[in-house]
Amino acid sequence: GFYANSSMPSQVTHELLLICTCLCSCLSLRSTAHQLCRVQSQGFLTCTYIHFFHRQEIMKWNGWGYSDSKFLYNKKGQAEFTGKRYRLSGMIIPGLREWMESTFGANLQHKTPAAPILNSSVVQPPTLNEAFLKELKSTGIPFSHDAEDRVFRSHGHCLHEIFALREGKIGRVPDLVVWPNCHNDVVKIVELACKHNVCLIPYGGGTSVSSALECPPEETRSIVSLDTSQMNRILWIDEKNLTAHVEAGIVGQDLERLLNESGYCTGHEPDSMEFSSLGGWVATRASGMKKNIYGNIEDLVVHIKMVTPRGVIEKSCQGPRMSTGPDVHHFIMGSEGTLGVVTEVTMKIRPMPEYQKYGSVVFPNFEMGVACLREVARQRCAPASIRLMDNEQFKFGHALKPQVSSIFTSFLDGLKKFYITKFKGFDPNRLCVATLLFEGDREKVLQHEKQVYDIAAKFGGLAAGEDNGQRGYMLTFVIAYLRDLGMDYYVIGESFETSMPWDRVLDICRNVKARIVRECKDKGVQFPPLSTCRVTQTYDAGACVYFYFAFNYRGLSDPVHVYEQVEHAAREEILANGGSLSHHHGVGKLRKEWMRETISSVGMGMLKSVKDYVDPNNIFGNRNLL
Amino acid sequence: MASKAVYSHRDPMLKKRDDFEDMLEERRNSSDLRYALKCYTPVLYKGLTPCKVSELKQMVLQSDQLGYVITQVSKEKGMTSDEVTGEAAAILEEMAQRLQLSTVRFFAFTLSKVFKTLFRSICINEEGLQRLQQAIHNHPVVLLPSHRSYMDFLLMSYILYTYDLALPVIAAGMDFMGMKVVGEMLRMSGAFFIRRSFGGDKLYWAVFSEYVKIMLKNGYAPVEFFLEGTRSRTAKSLTPKLGLLNIVMDPFLKGEVFDISLVPVSISYERTLEEALYARELLGVPKPKESTSGLFKARKILSEDYGSIHVYFGQPVSVRSLAESRVNRSQFNLIPRHIPTRPSEEILSFVNDSAYRLVRAQEENMVLKPWVLLAFVLLQKQAAEEKQGTALDELTEQAVWLRDLSRQYGAFLHWPDHIPPSEVVSSSLSLHRGLVRISEGRVQLALEQVGGQQVPGETRGAITPEEELLNKAVVILSCASYRNQALNVFIRPALLASAIHTAASNRKQEIYNSFSFLRNMFSNEFILCPGATVQDFEEACYLLVKTGTLQINQQEVLITERGHRTLAFLTSVLDPFLQGYQVVCRFLCEQDGLTEKQFIPAVRKFIIKHLLTGRLGYIEVLSSDLQKNALAALIRLGTVQKIKGGEEQGTLKLNKVMLNSLEDTLGGKLPTQKSVVAHL
């Protein structure tokens, strides 16, 4: 339930009631909403629930995504994905069990179920700053210090965060949650926070994987989580300049859906776009799957408004490029909530693409695949998205194939497999797959497609169909759900990313994967880990690589600690081999220790002096980055 | 006193070593032909992409690394890049190996015959081979055998073939190329040839380093080379050469492979084939140019008994773990890796420390035969001028005493404990009968002998005193080459013993200073890891205290009653070297305008003169190895400066004040010096 303070002025109570009603009607509409939703390219059905005050009612409090969507083993011991939101929803995935058993040595007999409900009694009572609270109430901005609300906003999705929640362990959580409705609300909140020395932590979609949302345990002030979810409107669309002015709390899927209604899109599709917010993208320097056409967040943003303890920062015009000293937007982008709250953003928009086509290419080995991607980048003809999975990930993707409906399909699959492995002589333990997504007008897409396939052919690549491509992208959205399944059966894991120059891609992939395997062995992990990677973005001068790493932790007394040590070692390995600290996940608190060596002491000093000027009292005290 | 630990001292008695198997035994019992034609299917590197010899060359010529240098050279020399590429291809052609199994099979057959004739046994630690096999499967492997004989690399390949392990490619000196047929055969058994010096030749260096790296990275074959750079003529380990080690570590440091395994291999010969050859070389008879016919003359050798060979494959050393928390690999992040760069100080010191560590690993696993201990005793007796020789019982007693001491110091001694010591001694003596004379139950070095160990081509009749001295020296240096095999066991305690002897008081600090001086002085002579003075001192103290020779408290070092014998022995170990360095200092003091080239002949002449007049005690200071090391040490210490470039190129600039004082310090209070100093 919503926390309504008894001493609340009646006007506020009234407003809240209104919201509640609206909320309930939303809920009751849920079933009908499904019928209206159309299947989107990303493989999930779009529905808008995110601007609920209580996201936990439709989202898991201790896992990824929607409560109704999850992997489980049914009574027959077959893997199944529940719910109705995704392409995979309601389907049986026959290969998953065997893959899990053989890859991790996992066993359906050995379960590690999560604590089913949050036990509010383990949540520390809030430390409230009464003076702040009193003035806040007078502004009429909704707030809550309900335990569930606070716990939900106390974490991102790092392994240790979710693992602790599943075990019912709750650390320091925000003392209060506020829901500003617009820029001016934020201005008021920040003013009050400064006045009463309250710590503010901006909260957007909650999909952080850098411990950025963790409350610093050493923080003694009252911590207020500033939830931007109510600031979710598109304020205007400017078709002449192809820009849209949007409130920063809007969630990716809503932004796209609303723009689509007017025939536009931003094209910014990070893997977390179902849940992550525009403000979060700006604050972390996010990157989208289709950046080859649309650009990363820094290319998409035209204007930013941010509320800081010093006041509001914004530029005076919307010129597409300016030579006015260092770009102040770059102090904001990547500031990770340490300087203020992004409230409104003007973004570039594009007419929706006329035509979309998936594709895939099989390469005899990863080396050839990387060489092909490099050539594609050299010729600057990368499709909207091009991703290369290594062999383990290819097998993983294979294991996630839903049950085929007809004998004919399975026969065709068999034939394809025969053609590739026997006729073309590809080693099934070495081959790897690139997935492609083309976008644009039909003719150009087909032309483009041919160009890319021709390049691929030079590197031994064989076109492997649209289905494989599409399934690859679908995986992106369900993989986070899979981690929850793993955690039910002693398997923990996570992904992390980096970027590097082209000539180091293979070396980093090999060394980091090998380092993970070795560290697991050294740390006493009893089963061989899954250590796999994929190249997810190409640039002129390099690429972005994702690593996936998971292991069966049976027999370990402190699995999370082991996990963290291995991830730490893997990051050391990345840095030693010339990879970056992060391509788009950000630094948060998880990777802070490497900041100085990453940007030099002078660089640190520059960032610190900005922080000291903008926020001398550390009101935005999440302690990320520096 | 803290310094980076390269080598931590620990109880040497606790060293665990594998057992040996004689691989010749099976050869004596089954067909060599069948063995040479056996099915050979070695375990290969898991990341291997098989490629042919010709493809390998293409990969080198097409590499970015070489491409960069080719462009650079063509600009510098005003040649077209095709011309330079042609040069590079020619270099590669001259260098490249052409490993083929049929040649290896041929060698397997012939060597079986030869080995069975020459040696009683070839003993291998099979566990080491199992570890090696595992290492080859997991990572690129570098084999680092010790180098005491031409035999070494044939022997290595022979062993690897026998045990079905991947055959290595071997870095060999160009001098083998002189032997046409043999050179080509070696090439076909995996040798690749490197010019001895190619100082400033960028192109040569690029071709060479790229060739080695490509073979290594791709796991084409284990890469084998000799850390010591050349055969040690003295049987002491030589201070390591860093060039190739630098090259093979580079792919790891630059992230091109996950790890590299370095496998030290210790090969010890009970009797070295080149025994007398080396001694003569050290005395200044120029090294005969390797020629095929020369090798066949060596057939005489075939009729002799060379005892046994022990080959110990050490623990593979992971470059990754060596580099851990020592090298910041991200230093390579900012320059494209194909551009050749001078290694940083950090890298150089890392490679240097690693090299020392590896040479020490080789030394530690070197099997020592009882004869090595006898050589100590016989040489010391000779120096003490006991003309009538040593009684067999006394020799045995001293050998047994030394056996126990060396074991306490961790020596890998193969002394057959089930046989009475007197028999052990006499069988050792009989194997080395060319070096000793036994008459009326007394043993001494065969110095007076005529004919037996004669220098070939020498005219009979009137033997000058100088020739007589050199003949003696041949025997003494041959014998010293056996004693030297165990020097590494005693060196740290010996330095401490000499330091105690030289130091003005028994205060620990003073002894440490003295130890540190001696250690620094002799660090070109013995394998003493750079920067590890404190560890070495502690290790020496530990050993001498543990064996009851010394008592050490907070401030003082005290000699126990039973410690005197040990100390006397240990000081005498270092004596010849002290005297040698001292006489080199004296010699230099008396020089004006000496060039580096003139140094050896001149110092030799000087020493001969003083030996003949009886003013010097140790004939072995005639060893050019010692003289060169002494000069290198003096140059390192800045006492002598080598002028580079200009008209005076190669001239030695001498700081006589320092030389004088060094000579005095080396003289210290050591009794043998007194006469020398007085006379000079």
Image (tube, coloured by chain):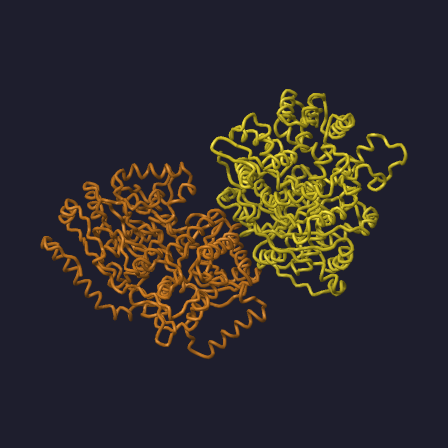
- Farthest right residue? B461
The N terminus of chain A - image quarter? bottom left
Question: Percent position (x, y) of residue B50?
Answer: 63, 59
- In the image, residue A95 sits, relative to residue B636, either above or below, namely below
- Viewer-nearest residue: A458 or B446: B446
As drawn, the chain in yellow is B
Chain A: colour as depicted: orange
- In the image, residue A360 sits, relative to residue B487, either above or below, namely below
Image position of A382 (left or right of A108): right
- In the image, residue B33 sits, relative to residue A342, either above or below, namely below
- Viewer-nearest residue: A120 or A280: A120
To which quarter of the image does residue A96 belong? bottom left
Residue B407 makes an appearance in the image: yes
Image position of A60 (left or right of A575): left
Residue B86 makes an appearance in the image: no
- Farthest bottom residue? A407
The C terminus of chain A - image quarter? top left
To which quarter of the image does residue B208 belong? top right
Question: Percent position (x, y) of residue B429?
Answer: 75, 46
- In the image, residue A415 sits, relative to residue A321, either above or below, namely below
- Viewer-nearest residue: B302 or A142: B302
Question: Percent position (x, y) of residue A589?
Answer: 34, 48
Question: Percent position (x, y) of residue B126?
Answer: 63, 58
